C-alpha cells in the first residue's frame, strides 16, 4: 500500500488516496467496486521508449557495454518480456555473458537461477511470483498448462485449442482461473470470433521447464503445420478483410516466426519458403518492419530447396527469388532487381514445374516497375501492357489475378502521368479504383486515391489533391501501413509547399522522414529529405536547405537512383545560384544534365537548362545563355504534360491576346490586354510582355521572339502564334470545341455540358477529355467571368478528374440541377 496527497481542486490537501497493486481483484468488499471513489486500472508493461531507458540504466549499473548490443535484438528481448520492469531488471544483467537472442532462446534455462543470490534476497524471484500464482490453480488446470509453453507470448484462443487439443470444458475452467490469477489477459478483436489471449511474459518460459521432450516434439510438429495453414488463409484475407487480417497478423507474428523456425528445423524447406517469403514477408513489409523481414529472407535464402528432376523452377524457388527481387526494388536497387527478374522470367519461359501462368504475368509487372524506377517510363508501359494482357483473362476466375490487375493499371497510369499523358493516366486510375471497389480491396482503393491526388496536383487542383491525399492517409493509417502513411504525409507536404504554407509543409515532411528512418526506407527517406530542402529554401532557411539537399544526394547516390540524384543536383545548383555561388552551381547543374539527358522527359531537363542559362547570363556569356535557353524551351514544348505546368492565368491571357489580334475587337479587350502586359512589365514576366507587344505589332517569327524567354514563356508564345487553341494552354470555355483559328463563336451551355459528359465516357474521342479538362480549369480561374460560371468550371473540372459526388452547394440552383442531371447520365 502507498498513499499520496490528493491534489484535485475539490479536495483538501490533507485528504489522501490509497493505491493498491494486486493480482487478485476479488476483494469481497463493496468499497473496492468501481465507482467515483474507486477506479480499477490494469497495469501493463512499460512503453517501448521507457523500457529502453530502464534497459540503458540497468546496463550502466552492471557495467555492460551498451554499444556491443544491437538495438533491434534488445527491442525483441524487451517485447518478449512484455516490458515488465521486474522481468527486465532480472534478465538484463545476463547480457554480460549472453546475447539478447541467446537469452531469448535460453530463458527457460535461466529462470531457476533467479531464485538464488541477491535477487532472492530482495524477494524479486520470478519463480517465487509464478509459484504463488500457480499454486492457486486447480490440479487439472496445472496439469494442462505446460502445453502452452510452445506459444510465443500468447495466441488466438482457437489456435491454442487446435494445437494443444485441450478438452474445451477443461479449457473454459483453466482460462477462467488463469485470468483470475492475472497470468493471461483476453483481448477482443473487432469482427474476429475468438479473443487473443496474452500470456504473462514469464509464464511460457516457466512452463517450458515442465513440458516433457516427447510431448514438446509432438506439439511443435502440429504447431508449425497449423500455423502454416493459418498463414495461407491470413494472406488471402488481407485483400478482402485487411483490417481484421492485419490486426491478427501483428499479434500472431511471434508465433508465425516461430512456426517458420520449426518448419526449417523439420526440413520442410518448401513450406518454410512459402510461409516466410510470401505470408510473413508480406505482413512485415506492410508493417514497415523491413530489417526483420530482410533477416528472415536471408535465412530462407540458405535453405536447400526441393529440386524438380527435370531442372524446372518450382513454386517455392519462384517465391524466394521473387521476394528477393521485390526487396531490391523496394530498397531502391532497381537495376539489380531488374537483372534478377529478367533471369527469373527466362527460367519461367523455359518451363516450370507447376502452372506458372500467373507468376509469369507478375514477373512482367515487376520488370515494368524496375524500368520505371530507372526513369524509362515509356519502356515501363510496354512491360505493363504485356502483363495486363496475361492478367485480364486470368481475372475471370482468379481474385488474386484481379487484384494484381488493379496494381498493373496503377503502375501503368503512374508511368503515363510521368510522361505527361494525364488523360490516359486518369482512365487507368479510374479502372484501378473501379476494380478495387468491386473486389473490396481497401489497400488498392487507398493507393488509387493517392495517385488521383498526385494527378490532380499536377493539373493544378490543390484542393482536390489535398482531399485525395487525406482520404488515402486515413485508409493507410487504418491498415497499419507506416510506409504508405509516410508517402501520403510527403504528398501533403508538397501540397502545403505549393500553397506556400511553409510551417505545415515542414511539419508533414518531418513526420514523413521520421517514419522512413524508423523503417530504414531509404528511397522514400531520400525523397522526403529533398522535399524538406525545397521547403527550407521557400521559407528562406538556405543553410538548412543545403544540408537537406546534401543528405538527399548521399542517400540517392548510395541507392544508385540516377533520376533522384539528377533532381538533387539540379535543385542544389539552383540554391547555389540564388546565393551567387556560380562555380558550385555550374558544377552541380552540369552533372544533373549529364544524367537527365540519358532519361526521358519526365526528368524535366528544361529546369536544369534554365539554371545553366541563368548561370551563363550571370557570367556575362550571352551566346552560351541563348543556347541553353533554346534547349530549355524545346525540351519543355516536347513534353506531353507541358500545358499543366503553366501559370493558372496562361489560358485566359492567351485567349485575350488572340481576341486582341482579331480584326474586329472591342475597346474592353484591348484595355484588358494592355492591363495584363503592364502588370507583366512590372514583374518577372517583362520579357514575355515584350514578346507579346511585338506580336501585336505584327511580328510572327518565333525564332526572333524566343530570345530571353524561359520554358513556360516560350510555350505561351508558341500557343499565341499557333492561334491559341485552349487544348494547348488552358483556354476559356467560350473557345472550347473550336477546330480552326477563325472559329470565334460562343458555345452554348447545353452543348458545353454535353461535351463534358461525352469526355467522361470511356469511349470518348482521343483528346476530348484533355481538352475539356483544360477548358473547365480555364473557366474556374478566369477572373472576368461571372462567379457562378467560375464555380461551374470548378465543379466540372472535379467531375472530369473522377469525382462523382462533388460539392454543389456554391452553385446557382439551376446550374446545380443541370450538373445533377449530367451525373445521373454518367
Image (cartoon, rainbow, N blue to C red):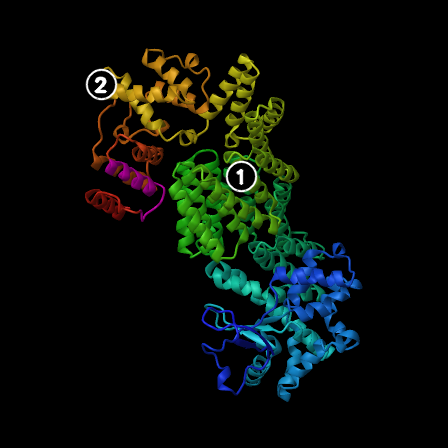
Residue 815 is situated, as x and y percent measured from the top left of the image, at 22, 42
Residue for point 67% across, 63% down: 54
The quarter of the rendered structure image containing the N terminus is bottom right
Residue 791 colored in magenta in the image? yes
Residue 230 is situated, as x and y percent measured from the top left of the image, at 56, 67
The answer to whether 759 is drawn above or below residue 432 in the figure is above
Tell me if I can see residue 277 in this picture. yes
Residue extent of the magenta highlight: 787-806
Q: Which residue is mark 1?
A: 531
Residue 50 is situated, as x and y percent measured from the top left of the image, at 63, 62
Q: Looking at this view, name the residue that lies furthest to the left.
A: 814
Relative placement, left or right, of 554 versus 659 is right
Mark 2 residue crowding within 10 angstroms, few (<14) / some (14–19) / many (20+): few
Relative placement, left or right, of 173 versus 641 is right
Q: Quadrant of residue 692?
A: top left
Q: Which mark is residue 497?
A: none
Q: Secondary structure at mark 1?
A: helix
Q: Main secondary structure of the magenta part?
A: helix
The answer to whether 799 is drawn above or below residue 225 in the figure is above
Residue 686 is situated, as x and y percent measured from the top left of the image, at 41, 19
Tell me if I can see residue 742 in this picture. no
- Along the line of sight, the residue nearer the viewer: 256 or 700: 700
Q: Are the residues tagged 2 and 1 within 8 Å (C-beta)?
A: no
The answer to whether 363 is drawn above or below residue 649 in the figure is below
Q: Secondary structure at mark 2?
A: helix
Number of numbered discs on residues: 2
N-terminal label among 2 and 1: 1
Q: Which residue is mark 2?
A: 667
Amino acid at each position: 500500500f502507498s498513499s499520496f496527497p490528493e491534489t484535485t481542486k475539490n479536495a483538501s490537501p490533507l485528504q489522501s488516496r490509497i493505491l493498491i497493486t494486486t493480482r487478485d481483484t476479488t476483494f469481497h468488499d463493496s468499497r473496492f467496486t468501481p465507482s467515483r471513489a474507486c477506479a480499477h486500472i490494469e497495469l501493463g508493461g512499460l512503453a517501448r521508449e521507457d523500457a529502453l531507458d530502464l534497459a540503458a540504466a540497468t546496463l550502466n549499473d552492471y557495467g555492460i557495454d551498451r554499444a556491443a548490443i544491437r538495438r533491434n535484438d534488445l527491442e525483441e528481448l524487451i517485447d518478449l518480456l512484455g516490458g515488465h520492469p521486474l522481468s527486465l531488471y532480472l534478465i538484463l544483467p545476463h547480457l554480460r555473458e549472453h546475447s539478447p537472442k541467446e537469452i531469448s532462446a535460453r530463458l527457460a534455462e535461466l529462470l531457476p537461477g533467479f531464485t538464488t543470490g541477491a535477487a532472492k534476497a530482495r524477494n524479486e524471484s520470478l519463480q517465487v511470483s509464478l509459484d504463488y500464482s500457480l499454486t492457486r490453480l486447480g490440479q487439472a488446470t496445472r496439469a494442462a498448462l505446460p502445453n502452452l509453453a510452445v506459444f510465443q507470448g500468447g495466441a488466438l484462443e482457437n489456435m491454442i485449442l487446435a494445437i494443444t487439443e485441450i478438452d474445451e470444458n477443461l479449457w473454459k475452467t483453466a482460462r477462467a482461473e488463469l485470468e483470475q490469477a492475472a497470468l493471461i489477459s483476453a483481448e477482443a478483436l473487432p469482427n474476429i470470433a475468438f479473443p487473443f489471449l496474452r500470456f504473462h511474459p514469464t509464464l511460457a518460459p516457466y512452463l517450458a521447464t515442465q513440458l516433457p521432450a516427447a510431448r514438446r516434439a509432438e506439439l511443435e510438429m502440429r504447431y508449425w503445420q497449423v500455423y502454416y495453414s493459418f498463414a495461407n488463409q491470413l494472406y488471402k484475407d488481407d485483400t478482402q478483410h485487411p483490417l481484421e487480417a492485419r490486426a491478427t497478423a501483428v499479434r500472431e507474428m511471434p508465433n508465425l516466426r516461430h512456426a517458420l523456425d520449426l518448419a526449417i528445423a523439420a526440413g520442410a524447406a518448401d513450406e518454410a519458403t512459402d510461409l516466410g517469403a510470401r505470408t510473413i514477408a508480406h505482413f512485415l513489409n506492410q508493417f514497415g518492419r523491413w530489417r526483420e523481414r530482410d533477416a528472415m529472407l536471408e535465412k530462407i535464402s540458405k535453405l536447400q530447396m526441393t529440386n524438380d528432376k527435370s531442372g524446372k523452377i518450382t513454386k517455392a524457388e519462384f517465391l524466394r527469388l521473387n521476394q528477393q527481387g521485390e526487396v531490391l526494388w523496394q530498397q531502391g536497387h532497381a537495376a539489380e532487381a531488374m537483372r534478377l527478374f529478367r533471369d527469373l522470367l527466362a527460367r519461367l519461359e523455359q518451363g516450370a514445374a507447376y502452372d506458372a501462368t500467373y507468376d509469369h504475368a507478375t514477373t512482367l509487372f515487376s520488370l515494368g516497375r524496375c524500368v520505371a524506377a530507372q526513369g524509362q517510363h515509356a519502356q515501363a508501359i510496354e512491360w505493363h501492357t504485356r502483363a495486363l494482357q496475361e492478367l485480364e483473362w486470368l481475372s475471370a476466375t482468379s481474385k488474386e489475378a484481379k487484384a494484381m490487375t488493379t496494381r498493373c493499371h496503377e503502375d501503368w497510369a503512374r508511368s503515363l502521368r510521368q510522361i505527361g499523358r494525364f488523360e490516359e493516366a486518369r482512365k487507368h486510375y479510374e479502372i484501378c479504383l473501379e476494380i478495387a471497389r468491386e473486389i473490396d480491396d481497401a489497400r488498392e482503393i487507398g493507393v488509387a486515391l493517392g495517385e488521383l491526388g498526385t494527378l490532380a496536383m499536377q493539373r493544378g487542383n490543390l484542393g482536390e489533391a489535398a482531399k485525395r491525399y487525406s482520404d488515402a492517409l486515413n485508409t493507410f493509417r487504418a491498415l497499419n501501413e507506416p510506409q504508405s502513411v509516410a508517402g501520403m504525409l510527403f504528398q501533403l507536404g508538397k501540397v502545403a509547399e505549393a500553397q506556400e504554407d511553409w510551417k505545415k509543409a515542414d511539419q508533414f515532411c518531418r513526420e514523413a522522414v521520421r517514419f522512413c528512418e524508423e523503417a530504414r526506407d531509404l528511397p522514400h527517406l531520400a525523397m522526403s529529405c529533398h522535399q524538406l530542402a525545397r521547403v527550407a529554401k521557400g521559407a528562406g532557411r538556405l543553410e538548412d536547405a543545403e544540408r537537406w539537399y546534401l543528405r538527399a544526394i548521399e542517400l540517392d547516390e548510395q541507392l544508385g537512383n540516377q533520376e533522384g540524384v539528377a533532381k538533387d543536383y539540379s535543385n542544389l545548383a539552383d540554391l547555389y545560384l540564388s546565393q551567387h555561388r556560380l562555380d558550385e552551381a555550374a558544377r552541380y547543374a552540369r552533372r544533373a544534365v549529364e544524367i537527365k539527358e540519358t532519361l526521358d522527359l519526365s526528368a524535366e531537363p528544361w529546369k536544369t537548362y534554365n539554371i545553366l542559362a541563368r548561370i551563363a547570363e550571370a557570367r556575362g556569356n550571352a551566346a552560351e545563355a541563348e543556347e541553353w535557353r533554346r534547349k530549355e524551351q524545346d525540351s519543355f514544348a516536347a513534353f506531353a504534360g507541358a500545358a499543366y505546368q503553366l501559370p493558372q492565368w496562361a489560358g485566359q491571357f492567351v485567349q485575350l491576346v488572340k481576341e486582341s489580334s482579331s480584326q474586329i475587337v472591342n475597346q474592353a479587350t484591348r484595355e484588358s490586354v494592355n492591363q495584363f502586359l503592364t502588370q507583366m512589365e512590372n514583374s518577372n514576366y517583362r520579357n514575355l510582355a515584350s514578346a507579346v507587344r511585338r506580336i501585336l505589332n505584327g511580328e510572327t517569327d518565333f525564332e526572333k521572339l524566343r530570345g530571353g524567354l524561359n520554358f513556360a514563356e516560350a510555350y505561351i508564345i508558341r500557343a499565341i502564334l499557333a492561334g491559341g487553341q485552349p487544348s494547348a494552354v488552358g483556354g476559356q470555355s467560350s473557345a472550347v470545341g473550336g477546330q480552326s483559328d477563325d472559329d470565334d463563336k460562343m458555345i452554348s451551355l447545353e452543348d458545353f455540358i454535353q461535351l463534358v459528359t461525352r469526355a467522361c465516357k470511356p469511349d470518348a474521342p482521343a483528346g476530348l477529355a484533355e481538352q475539356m479538362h483544360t477548358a473547365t480549369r480555364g473557366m474556374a480561374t478566369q477572373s472576368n467571368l461571372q462567379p457562378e460560371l467560375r464555380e461551374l468550371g470548378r465543379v466540372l473540372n472535379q467531375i472530369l478528374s473522377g469525382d462523382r459526388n462533388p460539392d454543389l452547394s456554391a452553385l446557382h440552383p439551376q446550374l446545380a440541377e443541370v450538373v445533377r442531371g449530367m451525373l445521373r447520365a454518367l
